Image: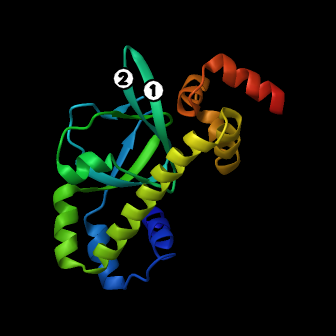
């Protein structure tokens, strides 16, 4: 259970969780492991899990005219959820795929609703999770409007230096909004 304690450590940066509440909270967590290149959510499916990533990298992407457009990477020690689908119980408009071997600790939608009722501190944790998801999306949008492709790459590279090497060039280029060839030129220029 050491890995679950890492989740507690992350959450307790924001709120202290009493032991009794933590026991109830973790009783609903399920460990799920996936090999790399596994699609864990397809367009048209309803997201039924909110997860903590113990290890791994996941990307969100949409298909547009036979092209995969990557719009988000989620790394270990972060939360994972197609949150719009999860909240509205509607079909996802995009895919989630593992880039590396990935281990998740997940709640189902139904279990999370029970936790909101049984463990009041879960409401605070849920608010914190929502805020984190919002801030990540807002920062991405602002970066797309204000930063050059090189600046976006450098920010991603500096934030996740040890993990970015596991992401194929075509996914990085798509995320940044440029071609793989243009990203290769940026990498050569800054190395």
| Quadrant including the C terminus | top right
Neighbour tally class for label 2: few under 14, some 14-19, many 20 plus, Cα within 10 Å:
few
**What is the x, y in percent for residue 164?**
63, 39
Asked whether 133 or 4 is in front, the reply is 133
Q: Which secondary structure lies at badge 1?
A: strand
Name the residue beneath numbered marker 2: 63
**What is the x, y in percent for residue 124?**
34, 75
Neighbour tally class for label 1: few under 14, some 14-19, many 20 plus, Cα within 10 Å:
many
Judged from this view, the residue extending furthest toward the front is 145
Judged from this view, the residue extending furthest toward the top is 66
**Residue shown at 31%/79% (left/top)?**
121
Name the residue beneath numbered marker 1: 69
Residue 161 in sight from this viewpoint: no
Q: Which secondary structure lies at badge 2?
A: strand
Tell whether label 1 touches label 2 (CB within 8 Å). Answer: yes
**Residue shown at 44%/80% (left/top)?**
15
């Amino acid at each position: 259970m050491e890995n679950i304690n890492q989740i507690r450590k992350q959450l307790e940066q924001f709120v202290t969780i009493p032991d009794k509440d933590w026991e109830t909270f973790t009783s609903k967590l399920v460990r799920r492991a996936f090999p790399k290149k596994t699609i864990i959510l397809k367009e048209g499916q309803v997201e039924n899990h909110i997860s903590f990533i113990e290890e791994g990298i996941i990307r969100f992407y949409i298909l547009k005219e036979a092209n995969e457009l990557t719009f988000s990477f989620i790394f270990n020690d972060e939360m994972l959820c197609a949150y719009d689908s999860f909240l509205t119980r509607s079909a996802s408009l995009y895919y989630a795929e593992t880039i590396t071997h990935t281990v998740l600790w997940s709640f189902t939608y139904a279990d999370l609703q029970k936790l909101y009722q049984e463990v009041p501190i879960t409401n605070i944790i849920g608010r914190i999770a929502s805020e984190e998801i919002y801030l990540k999306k807002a920062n991405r949008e602002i970066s797309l409007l204000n930063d050059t492709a090189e600046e976006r790459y450098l920010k991603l590279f500096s934030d996740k230096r040890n993990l970015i090497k596991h992401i194929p060039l075509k996914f990085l280029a798509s995320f940044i909004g440029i071609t793989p060839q243009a990203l290769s030129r940026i990498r050569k220029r800054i190395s």
